[in-house]
Amino acid sequence: MIGIKGPRGAGKTTLLLQHLKFDLSNLTDKGLYITADHTWFYNHSLLDTAMDWYQQGGKVLLIDEVHKYPNWSRELKNIYDGIPQLQVIFSASSALDIYRGQADLSRRVISYSLPGLSFREYLAFTGVSVYPTISLEDIQSRHREFSQEIVANIRPLPVFQNYLKGGYLPIFTEGESEYLPKLDQIINTVVDTDLAYISSYNAGTAVKVKRLLAVIAESAPFKPNISALAGKLDISRDRILKYIYQLRDAGLLNILSIEGKGVSRLQKPDKIFLENTNLSYALRPSPNRGNLRETFLLNQLLNAGHDVSEPTSGDFLVNGTTIEVGGKNKSIKQVQHAESYIIAADDIESGFGTKVPLWVFGFMY
């Protein structure tokens, strides 16, 4: 049993359908795709549907948006235990905690996350060119060589600006002019529908969560004053924390904690970011350039699987290396005392020494 989580618009449904069409082409009549919010389930259960499909010779069952089905975890457990010959692949919202369902799925499900596109993937999707990934370690040691290879073929800076504004989710291929309105719809759907299913939101709660998100978007990334937020929105401090972490789980926020500090939902986040730069443009007409740079870098580091914390000086600490983000003239003043450091500089095509072009960090996955 395989679970695929990710933000809305990342391509989970497309991935399932492509897997069915191409990877299972030798089982054309043995694979079935269903969506968990279909009217079929008004009077049928997932378990009964899986059993009927298996008895008809089915080998693979693909279930989309499983979080919209009541008691999803219990029925998935029963399918896994009762029909071991049937492979089940399901997709779910980023906010769904697969291992905390009503039934124990921790030993039964292999879970994968499907993030939005990296800058490297955006170049491939737009037909510019296909490039290999580069590790953070290789970025430190050979970023100049790597960037010069790419600059020999394309001018990365204008394409990078397009990516920051409207290239994180592959739905941009349906029309760039429609991308930000669709992103607005995704934000509303995540709060009104996904979190409503998962966290039992009602209409009043959804309005409060949207107000909180709007307030955060005005100045993200920032160090939050939870008491001030609670007073401004007339919500208790505990609920503010609860909503912030739910928005993080839903793929709308990223949270940064100080180096060495444990992460708990009862703790105040040390710094709050929007999850990606496209959200900045959707929620604010003219986002701050410096904020976009930090939001982009944290997003790419986390999506590449790195543990990131807030250092005593500089912007991010990753694997013992401090990263300071800024424009092309950014100096090493703030991080020069760190044992290992990188300057992630915007608006440059190629770097030198410890100064790395910001866009290069978009090739890590």
Image (tube, rainbow, N blue to C red):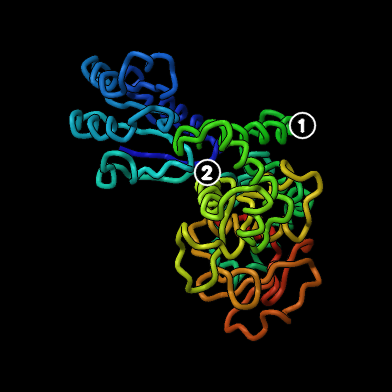
Query: Is residue 364 at all visible to an observer of this figure?
Result: yes
Q: Is residue 116 above or below residue 362?
A: above
- Give the residue type at disc 2: Ala
The local crowd at label 1, few if under 14, some if 14 to 19, many if 20 or more residues have their Cα within 10 Å, is few
Q: Is residue 186 above or below residue 308?
A: above
Question: Left or right: where does residue 175 sit relative to residue 316?
Answer: right
Residue 143 position by quadrant: bottom right
* Labels 2 and 1: the sequence-earlier one: 1
Query: Is residue 123 at all visible to an observer of this figure?
Result: no
- Helix, strand or loop under label 1: helix
Rendering coords of residue 104 (x, y %):
26, 43
Between circles 2 and 1, the one closer to the viewer is 2
Q: Residue at x 60, y 78 (%)?
A: 312
Residue 87 position by quadrant: top left
Question: Left or right: where does residue 293 sit relative to residue 108?
Answer: right
Task: Please state which of residues 225 and 14 is positioned toward the viewer in this rendering.
Answer: 225
Question: Left or right: where does residue 360 sit relative to residue 113?
Answer: right
Task: Please state which of residues 255 and 268 is positioned toward the viewer in this rendering.
Answer: 268
Q: Are marks 2 and 1 in contact (CB under 8 Å)?
A: no
Residue 250: numbered disc: 2
Q: Which residue is mark 1?
A: 177
Q: Is residue 165 above or below residue 363?
A: above
Residue 22: numbered disc: none
Q: CA distance from mark 2 to mark 1?
A: 25 Å
Residue 56 position by quadrant: top left
- Give the residue type at disc 1: Ser
Task: Please state which of residues 117 and 186 is positioned toward the viewer in this rendering.
Answer: 186
Q: Residue at x 56, y 55 (%)?
A: 237
Q: Residue at x 26, y 24 (%)?
A: 47
Rendering coords of residue 252 (x, y %):
59, 46
